[in-house]
Image (spheres, helix red, strand yellow):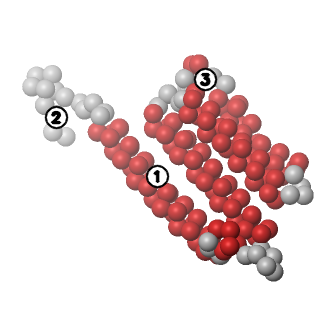
Amino acid sequence: KEYEERAFYWEPLDLVRKLTLTGFVLINTQGSKQLRVIIALLVSMLFLTLQYVLSPYKRTLDGRLAMFAHIGLVLVYLATLTINSCSLLETDTQTCGDEFGLSQLGLSYMFLSFSTALLGVGLLLVAWLVYTAASRVPTLRLVANAMEPLL
């Protein structure tokens, strides 16, 4: 009931996404951490694009929340890929600071602060959307004078 009629298949598709991110990636890529993150990133980007193109949710707020969650996942996987690459680059002659300008700890702090800021902005956006949706709800009015009743 929460999806458009034309997107009746979205729930099973979303379950396949969740299964892929949690099970398939771990089972089939036992050797490489980078490969796991790259597959998870590609799957998340694919579903972010599908979410944007198909707009399967009936309620706009549900669609925006799902879009925000997909964007958050893509950013987390990008941060993980960058930090993993940084740990692979560190040798005796080359450090992560040479490639990215920050140490591995600095990159971690940067992504953590950016993710926290993104979460804060997302929560403010959700609060604003809920407020505006609640303000558009029709109120009960008296037939005689079209005023709200005193309860």
Disc 1 vs disc 3: Cβ atoms closer than 8 Å? Answer: no
Secondary structure under tag 1 reads helix
Q: Residue at x 63, y 50 (%)?
A: 74
Q: Percent x, y for residue 19?
A: 76, 42
Whether 27 is drawn above or below 66: the answer is below
According to the image, label 1 marks what residue? 122
Q: In this view of the protein, can residue 2 be seen by the observer? A: no
**Kind of residue indicated by mark 3:** Ala
Name the quadrant containing residue 6. Answer: top right
**Kind of residue indicated by mark 2:** Pro
Q: Nearer the viewer, mark 3 or mark 2?
A: 3
Which tag, 1 or 2, sits closer to the chain's start? 1
Secondary structure under tag 2 reads loop
Indicate which disc residue 100 carries.
none
Q: Percent x, y for residue 69?
A: 57, 47
- Mark 3 Cα shell of 10 Å, populated few (<14), some (14-19), many (≥20): some
**Kind of residue indicated by mark 1:** Gly
Q: Residue at x 62, y 73 (%)?
A: 102
Which tag, 1 or 3, sits closer to the chain's start? 3
According to the image, label 3 marks what residue? 7
Indicate which disc residue 149 carries.
2
Secondary structure under tag 3 reads helix
Left or right: 107, with 122 as reference point: right
Which tag, 3 or 2, sits closer to the chain's start? 3
Left or right: 41, with 72 as reference point: right
Q: Quadrant of the N terminus?
A: top right
Q: In this view of the protein, can residue 95 be seen by the observer? A: yes
Q: Percent x, y for residue 77?
A: 67, 54
Q: Nearer the viewer, mark 1 or mark 2?
A: 1
Q: Residue at x 69, y 62 (%)?
A: 82
- Mark 2 Cα shell of 10 Å, populated few (<14), some (14-19), many (≥20): few
